[in-house]
Image (cartoon, rainbow, N blue to C red):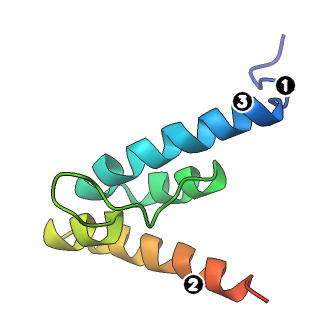
Amino acid sequence: MGCLAPRAPAQDEDAQADLASMLAIPVAQHGHAALVHLLDAFGADLEEVDDVRGGPPLMHAANNGHSAAVHALVAVRRRACRRLP
């Protein structure tokens, strides 16, 4: 038996994206740049503003001095902008 799960149905993909979005703020706050890319791959909304401090993950990474996470968030945003028509 392999370690990779079979492809998830669409509703599971939505649930994964929701969970990934919930994790975006703590990941940025703690400076986990590699996880930023992983969350993006799972469809996280990396622009979502948190209810407590009113800022997106980029603000949290910058406020906590996590330059690698800031660079990762900017790179993800840059890629997203390039995909726009």
Q: Nearer the viewer, residue 79 or 68?
A: 79
Report x, y in % for residue 82. 69, 87
Whether residues under marks 1 and 3 lie with C-beta atoms below 8 angstroms apart, the answer is no
Which disc, if any, is residue 6? 1
Quick one: SS at disc 2?
A: helix
Most foreground residue, 21 or 30:
21
Q: Residue at x 24, y 52 (%)?
A: 51
Give the total of numbered labels.
Answer: 3
Say which label, 1 or 3, has the lower sequence index.
Answer: 1
The circle on residue 55 is: none
User: Badge 3, how many Cα within 10 Å: few under 14, some, many 20+?
Assistant: few
Left or right for 29, reference 69:
left
Image coordinates for residue 26, horizontal then vertical, percent: 29, 47
Residue at point 28%, 75% (across, down): 67
Q: Residue at x 79, y 89 (%)?
A: 85
Q: Is residue 74 left or right of residue 25?
A: right
Of tags 1 and 3, which is closer to the observer?
A: 3
Is residue 25 left or right of 44 when viewed as pictured? left
Query: Which residue is under mark 3?
Result: 12
Name which residue type carries label 3: Asp
Q: CA distance from mark 1 to mark 2?
A: 30 Å
Disc 3 element: helix
Neighbours of disc 1 within 10 Å: few (<14), some (14-19), many (20+): few
